[in-house]
Every structure is written in C-alpha cells, then in structure tokens.
Image (cartoon, coloured by chain):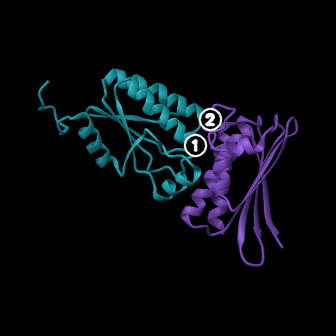
Chain colours: A cyan, B purple
Amino acid sequence: MERIPILKMGDYLLITIQVDMHDKLALTLQNDLTEQIVRHKSKGILIDISALEIVDSFIGRMLGIIASMSRLLDAETVVVGMQPAVAITLVELGLSMKGIRTALNVEKGMAVLRATLGEQEYDGDSSSQF
Amino acid sequence: MIRVLSSESMQIRTTEDVVSVRQAVRKKAVALGFGLVDQTKVVTASSELARNTLDHGGGGTARIEVLENERRSGLRLTFEDQGPGIEDIQRALSDGYTSGGGMGLGLGGSKRLSHEFDIKSQPGMGTTVSILRWK
C-alpha cells in the first residue's frame, strides 16, 4: 500500500510529503503518525512540504488535523519548506493556516521545536544522559 | 473575440481523478508559458473545484480549454456535475460556508484565484462552474 514514510530523528519525527496527496494517503498518514508519536514518545513533528507544488484547502485541512491530533498526544507540529508561490496562493485562497506553526526549512523547524520544548540540542549520538 | 485553441475533457469520479485534473491543468499552464505563481494559482483553483465536483456533485467532468483573444491567451476550466445543485449561490460563495465538512473555501477561493468566474446551478439540476485565467 502507498504510504508516506515517517523518519525518527532523535525526539522528533520528520515527514516529507513528496507525492500528490489524496484521501486514503492522508488517512494512512494520520494513523501511522499517531501510532509513531505514541511508540517513540515523540515531542515534535516536522512536516516538510517543500516538494509540494500546491497546497489546497484539502491539504491545508489535513495539516491542521495532524497538528491537532499531535497536540492531543503532547507533540508540537511545525510545517516547513513552503514554496513562495504556494504562500502567495494560500493567502488569496483564504487559507491562513491558523494554529499551524511554520519555518522556512527543516533546520529552522528543529530550532523552533527546540525553543518550544525547551530541550537541549539533539546531537545525534547517545552520549546524553537518560 | 475568444477563440478556443484546444479542449480536453476528463472524468472526475475518484480522489485520484482530482490529482489527474491538477496535473493536466499544470501541463497546459506550463505549455502556455504561465509564470510559477500563475501556474500555482490556476492549479490550486482547479484542485478546489475538482474536489467540489467530487464531494458535492457526486462526480462529474472537467473541461480544460486553451483560449486566445486579440491580445492574450488563457486557460478556461469548466467543472460540471449532475449533483443536487446549490440552492443559495451567494451563500455558497461566501467563505466558511460548507455543506460537506470541508473548510468552505473552494468556491470563493477559486473565484479569487481567477480572472473570470461563472457559476450556474439549480437545485436538482447539478452545477457548472467555469473559471478563466489569462496569461
């Protein structure tokens, strides 16, 4: 079955949306993501939409739903990498993406999560204390 | 006077068809030499309207036409369904009004993303929405 991969990066989960989203794929992603948040006790979700050529109200709604679900499971969501043409179009469409945090790229999104969660920098090795 | 240079019709029966319509519109917009922002606007509008056709109209057709007049070329997209129709078009055009669990931005939003917008609908007679974006 077609699905969107979810990568674990330290305390965070990274989702890169690269395909044209449709209903079944969106539902599968919601199920997979909520499961992984619980399994890994993830505190932050990064959704990279830099490969998306458009964001319509369907995808906007899906991002909002994911952010709300994640919040209920005690995880923060940051949407990163929106293309400038997409931002221009979204405003004209009337979709303000209220309640969804954004950052320009994955790196800046990680910084937002770190600042929000008040955590030490994740350095990728296991030297940190448990 | 507007001349139709090409016309292509597509079925909208599934959510995958909405994706296909989007891709076909993108291809035409690129071929016409639309800039990236204009491409994004017309493709986004097509996505909203194709989804309306599917969700509210129970499916239908999309027609993609390449047009030109004396001064410029453009893309006209027409979405037609034989669904329940719209009782109050003014209300359906206002942001936030929804009958289908969406965000209610589809009609008003795609109107804002287009240069010309036309809607014909009657309860029980289906809905036809047409948008035009000039290059």
Say whether residue A113 is left or right of residue A5. left
- Pointer 1 residue: A57
Q: Is residue A118 above or below residue A90?
A: above
Q: Is residue B10 above or below residue B1?
A: above
Residue B25 visible to an observer of this rendering: yes
For the N terminus of chain A, the image quarter is top right
Percent position of residue B49, x then y = 69, 46
The residue drawn where x is 48% and y is 54% is: A87
Are discs 2 and 1 located on one and the same chain?
A: no
Q: Secondary structure at mark 1?
A: helix
The type of residue carrying mark 1 is: Ser
Percent position of residue A84, x then y = 46, 58
Say whether residue A9 is left or right of residue A64. left
**What is the number of the mark on residue A119?**
none
Number of other residues with Cα within 10 Å of mark 2, as a class: few under 14, some 14 to 19, many 20 or more: some
Q: Is residue A62 above or below residue B49?
A: above
The type of residue carrying mark 2 is: Gly
Taking the view exactly as shown, the residue that stands out farthest to the right is B125
For the C terminus of chain A, the image quarter is top left
Q: How many numbered discs?
A: 2
Number of other residues with Cα within 10 Å of mark 1, as a class: few under 14, some 14 to 19, many 20 or more: many
Residue A1 visible to an observer of this rendering: no
Taking the view exactly as shown, the residue that stands out farthest to the bottom is B70
Q: Are marks 2 and 1 in contact (CB under 8 Å)?
A: yes
Say whether residue A16 is left or right of residue B28. left
Query: What is the quadrant of residue B65 in the picture?
Result: bottom right
- Pointer 2 residue: B102
Q: Secondary structure at mark 2?
A: loop
Q: Is residue B120 above or below residue B57?
A: below
Percent position of residue B131, x then y = 73, 56
Chain of the residue where label 1 is placed in the rendered structure = A
Say whether residue A130 is left or right of residue B15. left
